Image (cartoon, grey):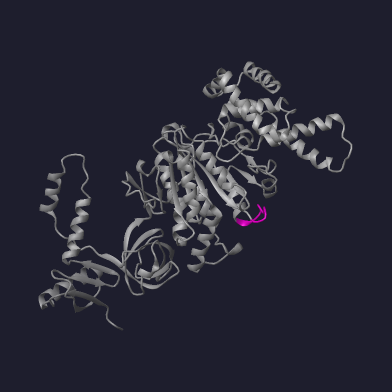
Amino acid sequence: MNKKTAVLYSDIAPDSVQEKRFIEFFREKYHNDYELIWKHDASIIKGFRLEIESDVYDWSGEGMLRQLKSAIRSVSSKENIVPLLKDKFEGWIPEAVAEEIGRVKYVGDGIAYVDGLENAGYGEILVFESGARGMVQELRENEVGCILFDEDESVIEGSVVKRTGKTAGIPVGENFIGRVIDSLGKPIDGAGEIKESDYLPIENPAPGIVERKPVDSPVQTGLLVIDSMFPIGKGQRELIIGDRQTGKTAIAVDTIINQKGKNVICIYVAVGQKSSSVAALVTKLKKFGAMDYTIVVNASASDPAPLQYIAPYSGCSLGEYFMNKGRDVLIIYDDLSKHAAAYRTMSLLLERSPGREAYPGDVFYLHSRLLERSACLSDERGGGSMTALPIVETQSGDVSAYIPTNIISITDGQIFLESSLFFEGQRPAVNIGLSVSRVGGAAQTKAMKKASGTIKLDLSQFKEMEVFMQFSSDLDEASVRQLKYGQVLTYMLRQPQYKPMPVHRQVITLVAALSKVLNDIPLEKLNEKINEMNEWFENNHSEITSAIEQSGTLSDEDRDSIISLAEEFVRL
């Protein structure tokens, strides 16, 4: 049986006395006999470096300097720091601390297998000899699988890997507002470095039930079709789902623009998007002044799969920083289907068993642990909230596919966008029958709840009648009126992009439409007339619009006034 060896690197060979001390150290520390092998290393001018299996004791000049730096960093006090540092310097003695290292066994496609790191934990950050960083994602008996955050060209087989003992994290702080960053918190907008206030792990446990309170305040999207029928509450998770190019991102962007002046921090996480698309989105947000309260986290399609994988978690940690300070946060994940694809790529490269549609078995947990972190915190926890709008892309409207069904079951409702409605010119192309909000009226103001009335029921009846009327040539007068009323409601819900409606405009429009005041207006002029009517109310009857905005209620008197005044406007 071969005797175990320990390798000593130094510029000068040890004498017999020093060798004897090393042998005694091996017996005391490892309870075993090791053969000491000396190797000349001219780069170690003073001291030595000792390697025993995966442990490294670095008592070279550089190693002791690193220990001293670490000791200095541990000093933190708001009092006078000079005497504390003086005590550190006077009493500091280098310690025989083992630094566990490993070596790269295989590297490729953004994945590295490392052996020798027996104590490495899942999610721990590793540092490679070249300075590249990675995160442990696979634990095996004799090796660990690591995803790389930097290009893998700098990582070569046989290079040294060191543990950090830290999990992946991201710098956070107020200074990130208005900036575009990557998955690791580095600025990519060319506007200089960002001074962080704190550093948070990207993976955090979700708040418990006791730490939450019921969702009871609305997040206004400014989109009439959503705010009236599928309201979103602070702390809710509302899925935006639909085929490619049906306006999913447009809804998210309009919602961000509508938060201006509402003291809401918005975070837009782009996963797998083209960099040019994200740049165009940032330009639009700047144009409407929305970047003043928005953070954009971009893991573009050209970034490695590991960076796309951690992007939503990084954005969520940024949101939690503000939520835990009592602020309201709106976070958009665009989109989680690309996020799942990035995770599938990683998992297959890590040689995990593929399941349905080649996704790994824990893909449900991938998104549930992310979305569960959205919450409306209790007053004892500061009362902050984080509202999530995840986006998922479907294929040919198939909501029963693996990833869509997973995320539908995690969220509190979904806004389903339909291609046929989009191409008909109905934008936002929201399918009224398949969309739902499980929070419902609890997330609506009293004014909106009263104004929206029976709109969803009326639209459902219209859709049924519209199908039936295709087979009938003769229509009685009542059916014609009902058909016209349904068409007015449908056209009323059409809304141009980047023009979210304030609450008072939504309320006035709903009251007028549901009272059938707008039925005589030609459909092609309806939206123009509605806009003119709202401007007329703001200019001539501001007491009504102010009352709705300030109180959030709609009295019977105001409702009657809106109907009579709307009739007066139509007659003008």
Q: Nearer the viewer, residue 156 or 118?
A: 156
Would residue 373 be seen by someone viewing this image from the given angle? no
Residue located farthest toward the right when viewing the structure as drawn: 474
Q: Nearer the viewer, residue 359 or 250?
A: 250
Q: Considering the image in quadrants, where does the C terminus appear? A: top right
Residue 569 higher or lower than 360, as above or below: above
| Principal secondary structure, stretch drawn in magenta | loop
Residue 185 higher or lower than 445, as above or below: below
User: In percent of the image, x 54 and y 62: which residue is there?
Assistant: 360
In the picture, residue 401 is in which quadrant? bottom right
Q: Considering the image in quadrants, where does the N terminus appear? A: bottom left
Q: Position of residue 379 (x, y in %)?
A: 44, 31
Instruction: Specify whether residue 397 is painted magenta.
Output: yes
Question: Magenta span covers which residues?
Answer: 395-402
In the picture, residue 11 is in which quadrant? bottom left
User: In percent of the image, x 16 and y 44: which residue is there?
Assistant: 81
Residue 557 higher or lower than 82, as above or below: above
Would residue 216 be seen by someone viewing this image from the given angle? yes
Q: Nearer the viewer, residue 500 or 450?
A: 500
Q: Nearer the viewer, residue 508 or 67?
A: 508
- Describe residue 78's horizontal placement relative to residue 464 as left or right: left
Residue located farthest toward the front when viewing the structure as drawn: 572
Q: Position of residue 519 (x, y in %)?
A: 74, 28
Q: Position of residue 272 (x, y in %)?
A: 50, 57
